[in-house]
Amino acid sequence: MLKFLNYNKLSIFRRSRRKVKKTKNRGKTRKSVIWQDAPDIAKQIVYLCDKLDLSWVEVNSLHCMRSENSQTRAYARIWGLSKVWQQALKQKPAYIVEVISEKYDKLSNIEKDKVLLHELTHIPKNFSGSLVPHIRRGKRNFHRKVEDLYNRHIKQE
C-alpha cells in the first residue's frame, strides 16, 4: 500500500544513533555508593536544634545517613520529601541529611557543626518537605542566616 515510501529515510522508523559519552575515570573502577544510618549525626542535630531553639525542625522526621564512594564536591546534602511523594505515599514531610564520609569525617568538630547548620538552614519554617535555595537576598539572606546560627552556637559554648 505504501510502497512509494522509503522507510529508511523516515525519521520515525530510523534508529537513533546517539553518541554515548565516555566518562573520564582514568582507569579507575567506579564503586557504587554505600549509605548507612548515622546516629551520631542525628544526635548532633538534635543537640544543635535544642541549643539554638530551631523549633520548626521536627527532629522525629529528620533522618541522617552517611554515604561512601560518592563522587561529589559537597561535604553534606539534604534531601526533602516533596509534596507529590508525600501524597503518593501518604506520609508527612520528612528530610534526610546525608554526610559524605570521605570529606565530612576529616573536618574539625566546629566545621562539622557549621556544615550541619548549613544543611538545617535549607529546611523552611513551615517544614513542608521543600528546600530553601541559596539565592535569597535582603532580609532573608541564606548565607547570613547560616552565619548567625553559627555565631549563636559559638557564643553559647
Image (cartoon, rainbow, N blue to C red):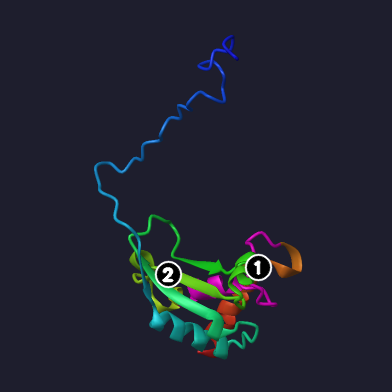
The residue located at (42%, 56%) in the rendering is 72
Report if residue 119 lies within the magenta region: yes
Pinpoint residue 122: horizontal percent, then vertical percent: 60, 69
Quadrant location, the N terminus: top right
If you read the primary sequence from the N terminus, does the residue marked by circle 2 or circle 1 appear first? Answer: 1
Name the side, left or right, on which 135 lies relative to 37: right
Residue 26 marker = none
| Amino acid found under the numbered disc labelled 2 | Val
**Few, some or many residues within 10 Å of mark 2 (<14, 14–19, 20+):** many
Callout 1 crowding tier (Cα within 10 Å): few <14, some 14–19, many ≥20 = some
Q: Find disc 1 in the rendering and name its residue.
A: 83
Label 1 sits on a secondary structure element that is helix
Depth order, front residue of 134/145: 134
Residue segment shown in magenta? 113-136
Residue 37: percent from the left, percent from the top? 38, 77
- 131 vs 82, nearest the viewer: 82
Q: Residue at x 60, y 73 (%)?
A: 121
The spot of residue 142 in percent (x, y) is 65, 67
